[in-house]
Amino acid sequence: MWIPNLPIAVITGVAATAGFVSLFKDLYGGPPYDKDASAEGKTIIITGANDGIGREATWEFAKRGAKVFMACRDMNRCEAVRKEIVLETGNKYVYCRPCDLADSNSIRMFVERFKSEEPYVHVLVNNAAVMEPPQGVTKDGFETQLGVNHMGHFLLTHLLIDTLKESIPSRVITVTCSAYTRGDINKDDLNFSKNYDAHAAYNQSKLANILFSRELGRRMLETDIAVLAVDPGLTDTDLTRNLAMSKSLTRFIIYPLFWPMMKKPRLGAQTILHAALEPKLQSCKGDYFVDMKPGKLTEKAEDYESAIWLWKVSEKWTKAHHHKAVLQKAFAA
């Protein structure tokens, strides 16, 4: 059948453009972390491990020989992903464990079970996040984004500090993003219960991630526990599923414009691998990295008084002080 020259030229041009865009996307994402860096002998906990960056980081850790605990809310999805990772990497030491960051009881049960099974945790990756969901609160009454992105990870880390201390050298890695630069800690209404603004609440939660890492790092100065906050950069994941844009025709206009500059999840996960495995970073105490490079923090992110205030409020709200004797011993050691 005869095909006009114009359509052939158009098809060829589209194919060439697609190839160029894909190549640009890979190059823009930057190089992967050292493929020879081993995780042999390490026990790693990662939240939000069944999707996006968390799934890819879990795959990479498993491929490099780690024992990985996937701390997830949805066990069906977690188990499906776990099976895939085990088959693809050949590492059978990958486990699913229920941990709902929107429920402090679930977090405590996760930690209790983990400690009954494992004596060590060498790397804790606070990765899970939600972005601008419908207005709501967690089971503990926290605004959803503050509760999942910050309070849940705050409590999880607190409950594991003693185990992290027993596992030194160990690390705590918290995933944040550039949205923190637009965030403010709303001290008058931290829970946004009076005038809810989903966008502002998300930005606040990401700034809280930074302040938490900074203060935790300060408290870990006399220990061999490294503390890092990392920004994977613009990555193509399902995090934006709740945005109005994602549910409208606008997505088909805006998304293609940003897609070439978005990293694939496997590349986005490299920042986590770098923070977890790079030997030179063991001395970090609240340091911030963007794309595996030291990042410059805003004044708000380095506000010592805000970090202290947030720490005390978080400790009170999550009832972390119920474990104060254990924590004081771990912090003082």
Image: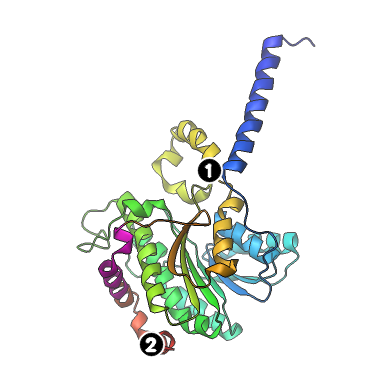
**Residue that appears at 60% across and 63% down:** 78
Label 1 belongs to which residue? 262
Residue tagged 2: 328
**Residue 199 is at least partly visible in this image:** yes
Q: Residue at x 43, y 58 (%)?
A: 176
Q: Is residue 56 left or right of residue 306?
A: right
Residue 71 seen in the figure:
no
| 319 sits to left or right of 168 | left
In this view, the residue farthest toward the front is 280
* Residue stretch in magenta: 299-313
Identity, as a three-letter code, of the amino acid under mark 2? Gln
Question: For the point 51% across and 49% down, which residue is it?
Answer: 238
Which quarter of the picture shows residue 102?
Answer: bottom left
Q: For the residue marked with disc 1, what is the amino acid?
A: Met
What kind of element bears circle 1?
Answer: loop
Query: How much space separates mark 2 and mark 1, taking CA atoms?
Result: 42 Å
